[in-house]
Amino acid sequence: MITERSLVKLLRDQVATCKSQKTVAAAIGISPQYLSDILAGKRELGTKVQSYFGVRRVVMYEKVKS
């Protein structure tokens, strides 16, 4: 399992390598503002970002003792 935090770190690393959020956003197919919001923790990873990384969101629930 990969966490959302890990994917955001990968995005940050790509931005650092490219030295441009605009370039990374274009490669993913999202707006630079949306990428900026993801990096700032204001928005979750959408389907285009998930597809870019070849992942999908999975929600899990765990039974707790009452």
Image (spheres, grey):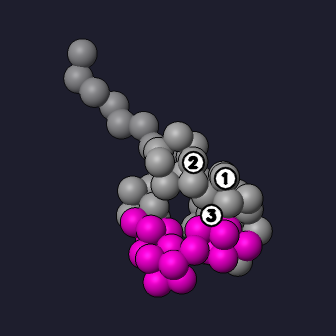
Above or below, 11 relative to 18: above
Pointer 3 local density, CA inside 10 Å: few below 14, some 14–19, many at least 20: some
Q: Specify few, some or many for label 1: CA neighbours under 10 Å numbering under 14, 14-19, or 20 or more.
A: few
Could you tell whether 21 is left or right of 60 in the image?
right
Residue 40 located left or right of residue 51? left
Q: Position of residue 49 (x, y in %)?
A: 64, 63
Q: Quadrant of residue 25?
A: bottom right
- State yes or no: residue 20 in magenta: yes
The tag earlier along the polypeptide, 2 or 3, is: 2
Q: Residue 37 got which mark? A: 2
Q: Which residue is mark 1?
A: 33
Badge 1 marks a residue whose secondary structure is helix
Determine contact: label 3, label 1, CB under 8 Å: no
Asked if residue 46 lies left or right of residue 5, the reply is right
Q: Closer to us: mark 2 or mark 3?
A: 2
The residue that mark 3 highlights is: 50
Q: Point out the residue furthest to the bottom here.
A: 17
Residue 66 percent across, percent down from the top left: 24, 15
Which residues make up the magenta segment?
A: 9-26
Please identify the quadrant where the N terminus is shown.
bottom left
